Amino acid sequence: MTECTWVGLDVHLDSITAAVLEGDAPQPEGVRLSGDLMEVRRLFRRLSLRAPVRSCYEASGAGFVLQRVLARDGFPCDVIAPSLIPRRPGDHRKTDRFDAIMLAKLYRSGHLTPVHIPSEEQEALRRLLRLRYSYLCYSTATKHRISSILRHHGLVYREGKSTWTKKHRQWLTRLREQLHGPIHTALAAELEHLEYLEMQREAFDAELLGYAQSPPYRLPVEALCCLRGVKVLTALTLLCEIDDIRRFRSPRALMAYFGLVPMEHSSGERERRGPITKAGNIHTRRLLVEAAWNNRHRSGADLILRRRRQGQPPEIVAIALKAQHRLYRKFHRLDQRKHRHVAITAVARELCGFVWAILKAAAPQGSMS
């Protein structure tokens, strides 16, 4: 430890504050830098002339750019999970310099937990998947506004039971031609906006399907699609957010990563468990809960599922069949004595375990690493 220099970095867009701890020095030296990464690289080169340099900074909107720059120069750099940084309850100081000093000291003592750093390609694919979901939310909000505009003027669709079907859209087109004045302008603007959002989302879907059918995603995507409620885009999102399944030693570790394990406050003989932690990856937790709703019905002959499972290894098909029956039984048992949303959350947690098992079984055929 005495032969290493520890550097804590507080990273912002326009400035970077570094705290340098050399060996067992009790107090670090503070250095204020601009946002130019070349200044950081020069600092690390000077420090490396005296001893090996190890550094870290908090995960934030700065992303992994600085980590990748330092790693390419041969300087180990960890990105730290902010929620797992130890903090003293009575300490209310919050400055860039103080944050950098605390990072350097805690990093040297081994009390910090680094996050997993994806490749640049995977990070970009994650962004595209999340952008696609954002456009889906924008489309839903636009549909709600259109319904609100019509409802406030007494224009209610009564030609069918469901809205946003082909018949309902034809009714909206006719209504748009019949209306005049401000309401016509408002309705036309919202319909044009909705058309643009849906067209853009379809373009995202087409590009993402192309990625899902290419290496290294094709084999694990097809394996995950054997599960009930998991289709191509859901499987691709799971793969991009999980990355290498081997970093999770057990299904429970993956469940905790997605925040699907219950909180616990037990002491002595008293055991008290609460709702799920909701810590970790919210995007994948949402997808697992949505997939869990598909397992609330009795499993039976399903032509689509049988087609997805054709050509898959028997081990993966066996895991998917086990999940299909077990998840329904779990939901049916819990639904009788708990709230339905609690039962679905429990099914999503169990589904997460089957995702882990399938990815472990598919890893030799198509590893994501």
Image (cartoon, grey):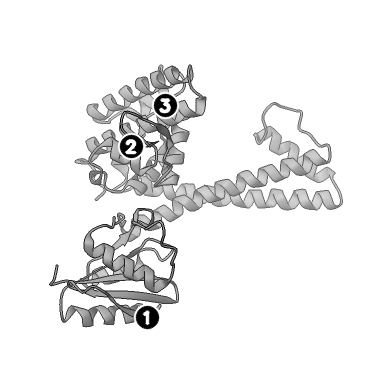
Choose the circle earlier in sequence order: 2 or 1.
1
Proximity of marks 3 and 2: CB atoms separated by less than 8 Å: no
Mark 1 or 3, which is nearer the eye?
A: 1
Label 3 sits on a secondary structure element that is helix
Label 2 sits on a secondary structure element that is helix
Residue 232 position by quadrant: top left
Of 181 and 35, nearer the camera is 35
Q: Residue beneath label 2, please?
A: 222
Proximity of marks 2 and 1: CB atoms separated by less than 8 Å: no
Picture disc at residue 304: 3
Question: Residue at the spot x=86%, y=49% of the render?
Answer: 180
Residue 122 position by quadrant: bottom left
Q: Is residue 316 visible?
A: yes
Q: Residue beneath label 1, please?
A: 32
Choose the circle earlier in sequence order: 3 or 2.
2
Above or below 148: residue 18? below
